Amino acid sequence: MLLVAKEWKPPGVDKVKTWIDDMRVWPNMMYGDIYNFLVESKAVDGQQMKNFKSLQSFNYFQSGNVGVTSSQTVSRTNEVFVHCNGDGSIVNGWCSCMAGQGHTCSHVGAVLWKIEHAVRNNLTGVACTDENAKWNRGTTRNVEPKPLSNISFKKPKAGEDIMDSDEDNNIPGSRDTPMYTLDREFKEAVNNSNLLPLYSIKGTTASKSFTCKPFTKDIIQEDHGDHTALDSCGKCYNFLNKYISLTPANVQELHMNTKGQSTSSVLWKDARKIRLTASSASKVPIKETTDCSAFIREHLYPKFTGNKFTRYGNEQEPIAKKYLQSEGHNVVDHGMYVSFTENWLSASPDGIINGDTILEVKCPFPIANKWNCLDELIANTKYDVEKNSEGIYVLKKKGSRAYFMQIQLTMFCTGLHKAKIFIWRSPDDNILIDIAFDQEYIQQLVSRLRTFYSNKMLNRIVDEIDNDRLVLSRIFRNFMK
């Protein structure tokens, strides 16, 4: 026998003609209503359902699974319908799952718990402030002038509610405030009103609102596509072309305009915020399954403002550079370098030596009773520098501070294939180490970072800007025009 499954629909759903997407009209459902339906209500056999197991559906709601497409579903998601009255009493429930015909499965319960949560947290119903002018009616500031014959001078009695009185009491009615969705509608209304001379006074807020250009959001409101490559999602790709992609001339201009880096450049901060950087790349999760929310949140909204170690480094770095100058090295400060081939990746070197070599300065903070000189520091295997078999200082490829990764990415972004790291403590205690460019290492690293940026990070940046949580400065937006 061949059984053909028909499309599942609950009884009467085909009679529903309208849909209101407004949480304020949700029914006033309470805990007792859910308990009565899942446990106390009667089944088709006239007996109480006593479906205590469905009370565990609260875990579904608490875990955020209501309204979310499951990543583990191999066929289709469950469709849930609930029939209830405005007072919160539940009539029935249906679900497309195997247990849905029993009307009280866990999926139905999860939807009911979501409604109860909204009611309990005052997310439903209409507040007094939702209605125009109701909250401020009756104050002396709202009294309107009227003929004396129409004004009542009667003093209300104690306890009398003048708001419910049939007398006029000079209380103005609710006024309809015009709302304009289009700029041309607003300007047309002003041109046809008696207030046009007010909007013509130059320098006033009214004049500026009438003559300014219409506001347009940076990002077009549209849905995301697949995030498998930089160009796989149309929404993200539009953002990439507008704020990330740079011509070689723009790369050079950004580099020249960001000298001074974080100490003074707003342009440097915004251009860095929407890219992966050589200094932050080591914090990118290596495994695709690792949660990256903490990294992205700290990258976009950094909470770290410095400590004694970073302050010491900022104080000693100029001294170290001055020492290198005295030793015959030509050290020049530079700004941000954006990779010519990977515009989503940037680096800001501490300087360029002799015009062709990256300089990275590190000033480790002395710790009493642990080390007194750099030799003692390096003897501790936790530091990123070690001696090779020939007794020469070299940089560890997998050091705990990821200095090697940072310098390799900096060379990749600048296009320079020579680098030096200068470990500084004093004029009598310092180490200068040469670092060669590792082509194979950088190819694998950039490939992994590109995948992370396109699949995990770019869409988060777009959403943060689209929702006005992340704001790019006017200086940066003007630069990218």
Image: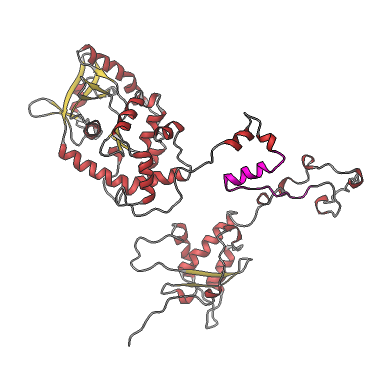
Quadrant for the N terminus, please: bottom left
| Position of residue 170 in the picture relative to residue 325 (left or right) | right
Q: Is residue 292 visible?
A: no
Q: Residue at x 34, y 62 (%)?
A: 72
Quarter of the image for residue 369 reads top left
Quadrant for the C terminus, please: top left
Q: Nearer the viewer, residue 257 or 13?
A: 257
Q: Position of residue 162 (x, y in %)?
A: 83, 50
For residue 424, above or below residue 467: above
Q: Which residues are magenta?
A: 172-195
Q: Residue furthest top?
A: 326
Quarter of the image for residue 377 reads top left
Q: Residue furthest bottom?
A: 1
Q: Position of residue 113 (x, y in %)?
A: 52, 62
For residue 337, above or below residue 469: above
Quick check: is 130 in the magenta stretch? no
| Position of residue 115 in the picture relative to residue 276 (left or right) | right
Quick check: is 187 in the magenta stretch? yes
Q: Residue furthest left?
A: 390
Q: Position of residue 470 (x, y in %)?
A: 45, 40
Q: Residue at x 43, y 46 (%)?
A: 463
